Amino acid sequence: MEDPAVAKPAQPDYPQHWEADILLRDGGTARIRPITPDDAGRLVEFYGQVSDQSKYFRFFAPYPRLSDKDVRRFTHHDFVNRVGLAVVVRDRFIATVRYDRIDAEGRPSETGTDAEVAFLVQDAHQGRGVASALLEHIAAVAQERGIRRFQAEVLPENRKMVKVFTDAGYTQHRSFADGVVHLEFDLEQTDRSLAVMRAREHRAEARSVQRLLTPRSVAVIGVSRTPQTVGRAILRDLLGDEAPADRPVYAVNRNAAPGTELDGVPVHRSILDIPGPVDLAVIAVPEGAVPAAVAECGAHGVQGLVVVTAGYAETGPEGRDRQRALVRQARAAGMRVIGPNAFGLINTDPERPLNASLAPRLPGRGGFGIFCQSGAIGVALLEASHKRGLGVSSFASVGNRSDVSGNDFLQYWAEDEATQVVLLYLESFGNPRKFTRIARRLAAVKPVVVVKGARHTGSLPPGHAVPATATGLRDATVDALFEQAGVIRVSTITELYDTGELLAQQPLPPGNRVAVVGNSDSLGLLTYDALLSAGLRPCTPVDLTTAATGENFRIALDVALADPAVDAVIAVAIPPIGTSAHAFMGGRLTGEDDPAMGSDDPEIAAALLEAGGRARELGKPLLLTHLALTDLPVRLRPGGIPAYAAPERAVHALAHAVHYAQWRRRTAAAEETARVPELDRIDEPGARRLVEAALSTRAAVAARTQPGGARITLSEAEAQELLARYGIDVSPVRPAPDEEAAVAAAAALGYPVALKATAPHLRHRPDLGSVRLDLTDEAGLRRAHRELDALLGGAAQAELVVQRMAPRGVDTVIAATVDPAVGAILSFGLAGAPAELLGDTAHRLVPATDQDVAGLIREVRAAPLLFGWRGAESVDTDALEELLLRVSQLVDDVPEIASVDLEPVVVAPHGLAILGARVRVAPLPVRSDLGPRAMSTL
């Protein structure tokens, strides 16, 4: 089948990369692409559906029809000086934009940096954000072609178009003459234009998910007479007791006989036979029949698809091609896609409930928004929610995630008042940069808890739509993303719900001081130890003894909650032992079970519920850990007190809540106080010139043809010169291929000196004996040179160098590496094998603020060595933080820098010394998160 979304290039230089799928303000989809001569018929048809007023606004005069000359002009472009773009839905134009390059006098030009721009949007599609999206894309195209400024003339009464320009956020100049508004605006992205673009992206993506979750009508395509089939099961779920009576549900089976009904629903042979509109279609037909079903859905005006059919990217390269074709076909018709290979969608809104999934029942209403990529995990998540008595606001299990992703649902949940906590099971990232940006904004108001599967490289599940740059995302990088975005990472489904339940039902802890109160000294001590291991500050446990009554619990909990030195309380409870009046595991400790006895003490439950109300008033979380009290958690549910059957589970949940609350407070404070300081000795133009020169060398040009592209390692001198442009001074070294050269080097640098090997296989390996330190005179230097020459197989092979001794201090390592999927990451750790083996390194995303770098050096486990451990003198952490800020600013200002490695950086009590540096550069990567809005095309 021919894909109408793909234009036929009429010229060999057709810019295919300008094509993009976009999401409009109302959640619908469209495609932007260049206009070609083959579009003459589409252009004429489009113009015929534009109102006379819109034509007048475009041409400043009545212009009822386009002449042949006009059609040729508007469809023939050189894609450099004259460019036209169209927005296409169902193979029809709904809007166009065109620019023409001009000189300073406003005449056509091939060299000017200005261009005139003009739009035309079909009246039926005005107000959908079409012109705003077109402006972003035509501006990006113009910049690519060397145009720096747009000019536009607009009639004053064309207020909608004036608003498009003024609201875009570009730096602009406005004037009025001869009855026309003249606008000029620079195309360089500004903070405001980026903020406007992201706000529009947020609204469009949230709206697209809302349309999927609240359809006015639903059709199931692929309903069989066999009750056990997927299509039939989904039909029954859509018709469940909770389904709204005013939402039509339709069944489609291409082979159905006229008059067929299934589950009380008439069966149509095609969705085109359904008399009314259909908002959502669930496709459950064999893979080979899906394209025809999608085409009919598009023709009928369906807004969204849930494709449960398998047989796509999870089956291999051919399946991935079919998956891409499915997404292109759906988007070209204005539809979004859940799936393929999806489990389905659920919305528990009592006014518009929806169960378009394979779940046999609708979950209870609650505050959890749940997203996952696996159907099996989706079942487990829904089952866990049901068993715990926890409600769901909405749920999506999207399978191969070819179109609608977790990012879209995060945008929706940010606006959804019913969602209090977001639970995610992720196996891959489609756009890690975007995830971090969206999750950070959401986590500032609602907790986001994540289980990240496929932690290890190479374990990515088949079928996932992931760009090549994101397939090898290191787990440490993922941790850095989550940490900076305020996302809570947990390890298991159980921990996901343990943490989510606490965050949904209890206030955030104001600190990390925890009281432990209960009737078991042993369980209290286990809880105490777990709290210490989690980095929290427990108070000495209060043991009420096993004979404690409900009144004893009430008094002790009141005291603990009222204590200003307590931020959270964990109650511990076991069945009273040795008394015949209380049950143990459904019966007495000895003897036969007594059905009249429960597995808890109602008085203790009442005391906990009363204390729970008091805890909320004081803003302190209260939770319970218990053993063998199976009825007690059920009694506590109405009061929203989480109960855990093991102390470790309770402590892990509380620790996550404490760290999240700290992140919220820190982030809120950082918005007021955190800054990127203005540093002296910054020469950005000079640094750019050095990098451009390095990338223009013959070696760099040759490297671009190698797998993975060009990553050029600068020479030692080049690296030192580049770093010096940002005030980063590396201690100089002199080569020492023989004794005489070593002596001359030491004389130039000044004693004391170090003699060390710098060959790649010996670099940073003092354990191999490749370094001699504190050489104070010529005799000692000559002796050391002879020793290393004999030990390492020759001075030339070892690449011996002489360097002036640095002051004594702590050896550290600083690095900044550009991950193509995430961006630049700043890393810090202590030097040496132990830190390297233990992975004791902390990370932050660039650009880093002063508070980011302060936290960075304190986050590593070996940080006490910097602050006077065991009576040693503290080192100059101010100088260390400033160096981190300089490295951060360098890689942020000059994105062609692929990596910077400083090792070792010796931090002394006063100042620091950089003894080694390596810098690699690469051609400027494409930053999709800074360009015009476009949907993923994986």
Image: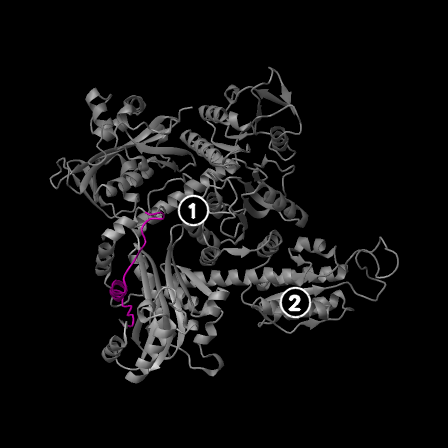
Using residue 303 as the reference point, say whether residue 795 is left or right of it: left
Residue 589 image point, x, y percent: 83, 61
Which secondary structure, mark 1?
A: loop
Inspect this view and state whether residue 560 appears: yes
Whichever of labels 2 and 1 marks the residue nearer the N terminus, that label is 1
- Residue linked to disc 2: 527
In reply to whether residue 708 is colored magenta, the answer given is yes
Using residue 233 as the reference point, say whether residue 812 is left or right of it: left
Number of marks present in the image shown: 2
- Residue linked to disc 1: 431
Of the 4 image quadrants, the one containing the C terminus is: top left
Using residue 623 as the reference point, say whether residue 335 is left or right of it: left
- The residue at the point 48 percent across, 28 percent down is 302
Report the front residue among 120 and 725.
725
**Closer to the observer: label 2 or label 1?**
1
Q: How is the image coloured?
A: one colour
Residue 35 image point, x, y percent: 28, 29
Report the front residue among 126 and 91.
91
Q: Amino acid at mark 2?
A: Thr
Distance between the alpha carbons at the discs numbered 2 and 1: 40 Å
Residue density around tag 1, few if under 14, some if 14–19, many if 20 or more, within 10 Å? many
Q: Are marks 2 and 1 in contact (CB under 8 Å)?
A: no
Segment tinted magenta in the rendering: 706-732
Which secondary structure, mark 2?
A: helix
In the image, residue 33 sits, relative to residue 45, either above or below, namely below
Residue 585 image point, x, y percent: 79, 57
Using residue 235 as the reference point, say whether residue 293 is left or right of it: left
Report the front residue among 10 and 581.
10
Q: Amino acid at mark 1?
A: Asn
Residue density around tag 2, few if under 14, some if 14–19, many if 20 or more, within 10 Å? many
Of the 4 image quadrants, the one containing the N terminus is: top left
Quadrant for residue 915, please give it.
bottom left
